Image (tube, helix red, strand yellow):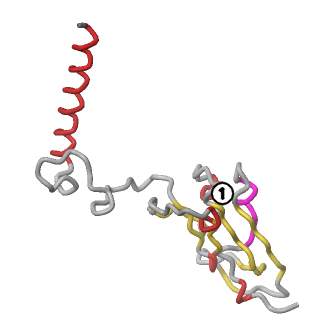
Amino acid sequence: MRSLWRGLWLALRHLVGAFRLRKRHPSQYAIAGTVTLAYPHVQPSVPENGHYRLHVAIEDCIGCDLCARACPVNCITIEKRKAPQVIGYASDGSPRRFYLPRFDIDHALCCFCGLCTVVCPTECITMEPTYAYATADRGDLVIRFGDSGAVPAQ
């Protein structure tokens, strides 16, 4: 009998919590009588400081390799070639001295810790609030950011 009362108490607690959540976020629970979200049609709001998909602004990358060295699971692959002179400047004014024909991030390996975003001196690698990118093929989770079109033939 005691476990029955505990189970009922737990169910009531969850029901009250769901109604409180519904009052705090009425736009997400606009359909009358529902407690859960209709996920593909209604997207939940995501926190700004969450760790989601990585994005690289390759035009700001100076090729310092700090992100690849800081990654605990080695999901960042960078191939760089030295340029004969400065090829441009990042948005913070740092000179770009390397061509980056390959800059790949394997999201299947990534643990989304955010260490690569912390160590980047030009802040070109960031977390974007995209979280629904499921796929049936693991190869689709490798995102290629390299600027192979800018590399001169050798």
- The magenta segment: 63-70
67 is within the stretch colored magenta: yes
- Indicate left or right for 146 with 55 as reference: right
**Which residue is disc 1 drawn over?**
119
Q: Is residue 118 above or below residue 61?
A: above
The quadrant in which the C terminus is found is: bottom right
Disc 1 crowd, CA 10 A, few/some/many (<14, 14-19, 20+):
some
Farthest left residue in view: 32
Q: Nearer the viewer, residue 151 or 121?
A: 151
Disc 1 residue type (three-letter)? Val
Residue positioned 69% across, 77% down in the render:
146
Considering the numbered disc 1 on the image, is that residue within a helix, a strand or a loop?
Answer: helix
For the residue pair 121 and 57, the one nearer the viewer reads as: 57
Residue 41 position, x and y percent, is 28, 63
Based on the displayed image, in which of its 4 quarters is residue 7 positioned?
A: top left
Q: List x then y, in percent, for residue 31.
A: 15, 55
| Total numbered badges shown on the rendered structure | 1
Residue beneath the point at 15% across and 45% down: 23
User: Going by the picture, which residue comes out furthest to the right?
Assistant: 154
Q: Main secondary structure of the magenta part?
A: helix
Residue 18: x and y, percent?
A: 21, 38
